[in-house]
Each structure stands twice: as structure tokens, then as C-alpha cells.
Image (cartoon, helix red, strand yellow):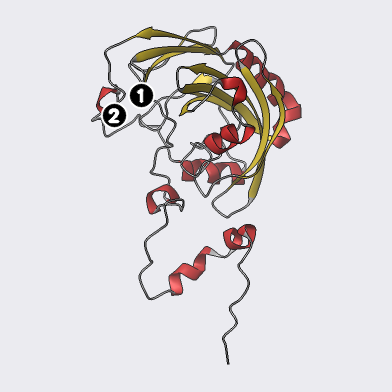
């Protein structure tokens, strides 16, 4: 008789399988595929890969204006700025990011390589960049249910409204909304992702997200700085501020409805 294998499990079913099953396995785990979550990510120790090589520490003025300089692969430095009602967060984990005190609302900058001009890029380019397992929202797996709700290609800046669902430590699904403001510098797309949970979207979150997105500005200048890890001002530093937490701490805080964790977004 031929053994009949069970049908492949759906993604959601796999993600919801109790983590306790791992404890009963005697054999060692096989090597993880490239897209899987590493142990360091699950423990909250890995830093999101946002393409950011920072010249100096980002700064925030009293009025809320945030500014930073990031090295681009094209031999240029991008001067980045945006307005935020939330405080700039610091530490080796973060690049350029502002976050509400309760960790729910905020905005961050991401740089991604692209072929072609900004207006011709497919919508999936933005979803894949933002919703990657190695991205800002990928602590417990790549976000699911990603959708582009609107897409404005006017005036040299591309503005998209997106929705997606992130996963918590217990595999609970947390719907989110965000506004993406993207500009092109050579082969690099520099974008600000500003958003909050879906429940906060109509409670002031949308207004804050759109305000930050509309203020996003990027200019460039020629530079001899190399697009390499050693160029980043944080290179070689192994510790962050005393209040620095992990994405694991943050997602647990969000689930419990408690204050400030790290994941925040």
C-alpha cells in the first residue's frame, strides 16, 4: 500500500500550532530555510534589516522635527527629515524611528534597492520590502494579509496606504494600518512608514500617520563614505541605553495592554 501524506497545512494553521510541541522533540532541528525565523529573531535579539547605514545619531528638535543622514550605495549621503508628534527612540536596535510612549503608534525610515523608476514600481515591491520576515514587523514571522489600499504617484513622491497583520509571541494576529511616503534616489527607494494598530487608526492614529508622511523630505549630496557596516556610527558598539528592550518584550507588552516595549509598531 502507498502511504498517503496529509495535505499541506495552511500558513495560519502552522503559525498557530502550540510552541510547546517543540519541547517533546528529541532529534535536533534541521537547518532553517532562508525565509524562516532564526532563533535570535524569536528571542528578540535580531535587528530589523532596513538598509540603513547612519552617519551620525538621528536628532529631534523640540518642535518634533526629526533629522538623520544615511549613506547610500551610489556614493551619496541622504539627508532625511520628517515631523513627528512622537519621541525619537535611540539605541543600537533602532535606525531612524519615532514612537508613542505606549509603543503603539510611530514611524520609521527604510531604504530598499529597486530597478526602474519610482512610478513604475509594482505595489508588491513596497509590501515585500515592508512586510519581510527580516523587516520591522517580522519578529514572529512575516506579516500576512498585506494590501495596498490606495496609491498616489504624483509630484515625485509616491504615497501608499497599506494594511497588514503582524503576529504576536502567542501567534495572535494584530491588524495594522500605515501610510508609506516614498522617494527615489538613484537605485534606492527611501521611504517613511508611519502607522498604528487598526483599532487606533480612527482614534487619531490616521491623522498622525498622514501628518508625518506628508512632511517626509529627502535630499542628497556626494560623499566618499562607503555603504558598509563599518561606516555606521554604531559599528563596534555592543550596548544600548539602559531602557533598551527587545521586540519580544514589546509584543508581549502590546498583548497585555501594558506600557512601552520595543516592537511598538
Q: Secondary structure at mark 1?
A: loop
Asked if disc 2 and disc 1 are in contact, CB closer than 8 Å, the reply is yes
- Asked whether residue 55 is in view, the answer is yes
Q: Position of residue 225 (x, y in %)?
A: 28, 16
Taking 65 as reference, is 89 above or below it?
below
**Which residue sits at x=38%, y=67%?**
29
Taking 164 as reference, is 221 above or below it?
above
Q: Position of residue 189 (x, y in %)?
A: 50, 23
Q: Quadrant of residue 232?
A: top left
**Which residue sits at x=31%, y=23%?**
227
Outermost residue on the right side: it is 202
Q: From the image, tell me which residue sits under label 1.
A: 53
So how many labels did they put on this image? 2
Q: From the image, tell me which residue sits under label 2.
A: 229
Which mark is first along the chain, 1 or 2? 1
**Which residue sits at x=63%, y=13%?**
214
**Left-right relation of 186 to 55:** right
Q: Which mark is residue 115?
A: none
**Left-right relation of 224 to 217:** left
Q: Quadrant of residue 84?
A: top right
Amino acid at each position: 500500500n502507498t502511504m498517503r501524506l496529509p495535505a499541506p497545512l495552511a500558513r495560519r494553521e502552522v503559525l498557530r500550532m502550540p510552541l510547546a510541541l517543540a519541547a517533546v522533540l528529541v532529534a535536533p532541528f534541521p537547518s532553517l530555510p532562508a525565509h524562516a525565523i532564526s532563533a535570535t529573531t524569536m528571542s528578540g535579539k535580531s535587528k530589523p534589516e532596513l538598509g540603513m547605514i547612519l552617519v551620525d545619531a538621528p536628532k529631534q528638535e523640540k518642535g518634533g522635527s526629526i533629522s538623520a543622514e544615511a549613506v547610500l550605495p551610489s556614493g551619496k549621503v541622504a539627508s532625511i527629515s520628517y515631523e513627528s508628534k512622537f519621541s525619537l527612540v535611540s539605541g543600537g536596535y533602532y535606525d531612524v524611528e519615532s514612537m508613542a510612549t505606549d509603543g503603539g503608534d510611530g514611524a520609521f525610515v527604510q531604504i530598499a534597492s529597486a530597478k526602474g523608476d519610482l512610478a513604475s514600481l509594482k505595489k508588491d515591491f513596497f509590501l515585500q520590502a515592508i512586510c519581510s520576515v527580516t523587516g520591522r514587523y517580522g519578529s514572529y514571522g512575516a506579516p500576512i494579509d498585506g494590501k495596498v489600499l490606495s496609491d498616489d504617484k504624483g509630484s515625485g513622491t509616491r504615497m501608499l496606504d497599506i494594511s497588514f497583520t503582524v503576529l504576536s509571541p502567542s501567534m495572535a494576529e494584530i491588524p495594522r494600518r500605515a501610510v508609506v511616503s516614498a522617494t527615489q534616489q538613484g537605485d534606492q527607494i527611501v521611504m517613511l512608514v508611519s502607522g498604528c494598530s487598526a483599532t487606533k487608526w480612527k482614534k487619531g492614529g490616521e491623522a498622525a500617520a498622514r501628518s508625518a508622511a506628508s512632511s517626509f523630505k529627502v535630499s542628497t549630496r556626494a560623499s566618499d563614505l562607503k555603504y558598509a557596516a563599518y561606516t555606521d556610527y554604531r559599528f563596534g558598539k555592543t550596548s544600548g541605553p539602559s531602557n533598551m528592550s527587545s521586540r519580544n518584550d514589546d509584543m508581549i507588552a502590546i498583548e497585555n495592554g501594558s506600557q512601552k516595549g520595543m516592537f511598538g509598531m
